[in-house]
Amino acid sequence: MASGYHRPRPSGMAGAILDKQKAKFNEKEAKNLLEWIQSLTQESFPTDAAGFKEVLADGQLLCKLLNAIQAGTVKKIMKPISNFNCLENINQFCAGARKLGVKDEETFQSVDLFEGRDLFSVCVTLQSLARKVEKEFGIEPPKQISRDKI
């Protein structure tokens, strides 16, 4: 997937916003979310926060997560043979999360994950989904980190 092409880092206001979003990303929370996804999907993958983007970026695991929560939520999970397919999987996840009750303002944009622009927003969406499915389906949420660790 990685073509070796890296977009230059935006300067000025856009760069400052990206830095702020990166600062909000909490590695412990990311690890807890990956462990939660692993427990629901029964898939095997590394759960260290350093690999958060790489594990989720093709969208397959996110689609499998939705199907583990409610079978048939994502009808066809695309093979990650192109960027289009990966983005389509991510879009299907976001649409499925909304169907399960995640608010639009708590749903990340595809590029936030695919390009690693805003992994904090990805965590927000997953936490929101976890709260919804805990109420709706009685599914145990991810381990929470204490406020003083945020």
Image (cartoon, rainbow, N blue to C red):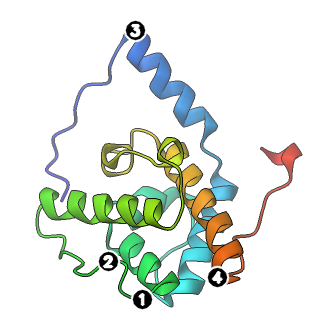
Left or right: 47, with 112 as reference point: right
Residue matched to label 4: 137
Q: Alpha-carbon neighbours of circle 4 within 10 Å: few (<14), some, or many (≥20)?
A: few
Within-10-Å neighbours for mark 3: few <14, some 14–19, many 20+:
few
Quadrant of image for the C terminus: top right
In the image, residue 122 above or below residue 144: above
**Horizontal and vertical percent position of residue 25:** 60, 43
Q: Residue at x 85, y 47 (%)?
A: 147
Q: Is residue 71 visible?
A: yes
Residue, disc 1? 71
C-alpha span from label 2 to label 1: 8 Å
Placement of the N terminus among the 4 image quadrants: bottom left
Which residue does the numbered mark 2 point to in the structure image?
74
Q: Nearer the viewer, residue 112 or 16?
A: 112
Cα–Cα gap, marks 4 and 1: 12 Å
In percent of width and height, residue 72 lies at: 35, 86
81 horizontally vs 77: left or right: left
Q: Residue 129's spot in the image, x, y percent?
A: 57, 64
